[in-house]
Amino acid sequence: MSGMDAFIQLAPWIVGGAIAIVGACVWGWAHTTKMRIQNGYPLEGMWGQSLKPDLTTESMERVKLLTQENAALKAEVGAIKDRLQTIERIVTDKGFDVSHQIEALRQQEPRIEDRSAAR
């Protein structure tokens, strides 16, 4: 059997393999594009220009509002972490008098009901 006969016998496998590879690449590209659209990522053309979503003043305003909300939420989480650390310190300290520390905290800041009654 010559080299040409072997090539002719393997040609369907070579062509089929090439078609399978190209098909997998096209499917991957289409799937990636679908996922980008579903999750709100911007789509780009061949030269990096934005295709979707269009950058409008409304979308820029939305990004600005989300950024501000994100900063506020980060600050709130930081405050909660600080409070949790204080509680953990009170609970885990050896030889503490919990009722004494709670009363000391109550005396530091008047409660909301006390402030309204004082007026």
Image (cartoon, grey):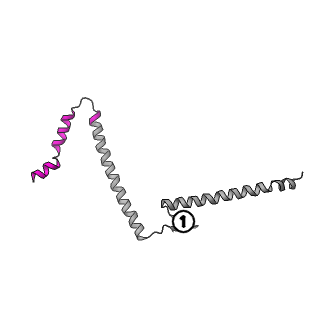
Residue 51, above or below 87: below
Q: Residue furthest right?
A: 1
- 1 or 78, which is in the foreground? 1
- Residue 40 lies, in percent from the top left, at 48, 61
Q: Is residue 118 left or right of residue 95?
A: left
Q: Residues within 10 Å of mark 1 (few under 14, many from 20)?
A: few
Q: Does 99 appear in magenta? A: yes
Q: Does 78 appear in magenta? A: no
Q: Which residue is mark 1?
A: 44
Q: Residue furthest top?
A: 95
Q: Which image quarter is the C terminus in?
A: bottom left
Q: Residue at x 13, y 51 (%)?
A: 115
- Residue 91 lies, in percent from the top left, at 28, 35
Q: Residue at x 48, y 59 (%)?
A: 39
Residue 42, above or below 92: below
Residue 33, above or below 98: below
User: To which quarter of the image does residue 13 belong?
Assistant: bottom right
- Residue 99 lies, in percent from the top left, at 19, 35
Q: Please, what is the dominant secondary structure of the magenta stretch? A: helix
Tell me the SS state at disc 1.
strand
- Residue 60 lies, in percent from the top left, at 41, 67
Q: Is residue 103 left or right of residue 9?
A: left
Q: Residue at x 35, y 52 (%)?
A: 74
User: To which quarter of the image does residue 68 belong?
Assistant: bottom left
Residue segment shown in magenta: 90-119
Q: Amino acid at mark 1?
A: Glu
Q: Residue at x 50, y 63 (%)?
A: 42
